Amino acid sequence: MRGESEQGRDVSVDGEVVLKLDSVSHSFGSTRVLDAVTIDAKAGELLCLLGPSGCGKTTALRLAAGIEELQQGRIVLAGQTVAAPGAQVPPERRSVGMVFQDYALFPHLSVLRNVQFGLVGAEWADLDGDAKRKRAMEALDQVGMANYAESYPHMLSGGQQQRVALARALAPKPRVLLLDEPFSGLDSNLRAHIRDETLHVVKDSGTTTLIVTHDPEEAMYMADRIVVMNAGRVEQIDRPDALYRAPANAFVASFFSSINRLEGVVRGGAVATPFGNLPTPIADGTRVEILIRPEALRVALPTGPLGPWQAEAHVLDARMLRRASFIHLCFGEFEGQHLHFHSREPARLMPGIGVHVSVTLDRAQTFVFPVAPKNP
Ligand code: ATP
């Protein structure tokens, strides 16, 4: 199905887009868990699906793999429509490799046999045992596990099992690799190490990859682009730095870190804050929320009158969190709101409780959005 035209754009084997979920919706019973989700992954790209538990990430992955039957929309893989309502290409013919959350290794098969088991699909069907063994060993070598070929899964650590699962998924050289929370079973130190290794293995393989995670830091560490999902919808797709610097809405802004929040009404093209009137293009009269990242608040001992974008506060508490100081600040009452904000910055200052400080606002890390209407 090369050269299939879609809204004037070419989705082809040689084109940029390798996997496309096109307006995919899905329900379990009467509950809609995906709502018109459109995602495209480009050749060699590592895309992270990021969102809170239950927002539909795994369902999107399972639909792409063909494990779940598509109800609405379309899935295009390497230029071929592999799923449309009532027409499914089976998983083993999609050229998709999958790593499940629990790795799903067969306990009674050796590491090598587990990886050989992954050699499904037409191009591997006619290969003899030796050729399959050779390819499986290459895949194990790719993840640094060739020395464990004759071991059994129960003899391996969690990180080693994860690498075997990755080798099994990569062995048939799939067009697309799908990983569902692949590091969730690992403790935090090992997790950082294995995710770094996985990043390099996946990138070196050049395989287009979709990783599901609910951990923003993991997504920012690994992804070329992040798909932020919430309640079955895509909120924003962009590069990690762009998402952090220019979130499309309050959900995206607050998903990447804890955030300080106050409300106001736009008057004369600006909204009032303790730091001064913040200009906004949002229409006058609109109720808005102002979101301020903890990194946007720079705390200092006062040295004179307040300057522009400065406000006075007193310290409620101050903690050292690794190499950052985390300071609880009270700005008192402001337009009927009691403002207790958090500042996080490289540990320069650990003021005592009750100390009066001046706080400077970095406007580049401050966002203004209309307040979402409440559900009736
Ligand atoms: P998590 O990070 O917790 O795995 P998720 O974002 O991956 O969450 P999904 O696993 O896709 O979310 O689930 C989305 C919603 O669909 C959840 O409310 C879940 O309970 C529901 N769900 C998932 N699979 C089924 C199923 N087979 N039958 C009924 N409901 C399901």
Image (spheres, grey):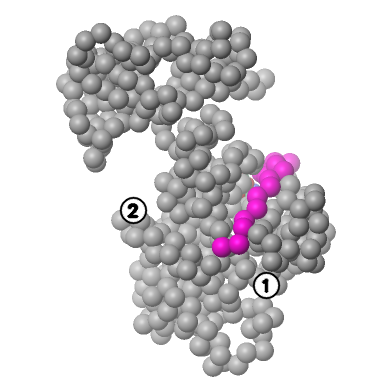
The reply to whether residue 319 is in sight is yes
Q: Is residue 14 above or below residue 250?
A: below
Toward the viewer: 160 or 226?
A: 226
- Residue 176, by quadrant, is bottom right
Residue 257: say if magenta. no
Dominant secondary structure of the residues highlighted in magenta in the image: strand
Amino acid type indicated by mark 2? Ser
Toward the viewer: 259 or 85?
A: 259
Residue 34: say if magenta. yes
Q: Which residue is mark 1?
A: 92
Q: Which residue is mark 2?
A: 188
Please provide percent x and percent y for residue 362: 38, 25
Please provide percent x and percent y for residue 120: 63, 78
Amino acid type indicated by mark 1? Glu
Q: Is residue 36 above or below residue 47?
A: above
Residue in the image at 61% along x and 10% along y: 284
Stretch of the chain drawn in magenta? 30-44
Toward the viewer: 218 or 361?
A: 361
Q: Are marks 1 and 2 in contact (CB under 8 Å)?
A: no
Left or right relative to 241: residue 26: right
Circle 2 Cα neighbour tier, 10 Å, few/some/many (<14 / 14–19 / ≥20): few
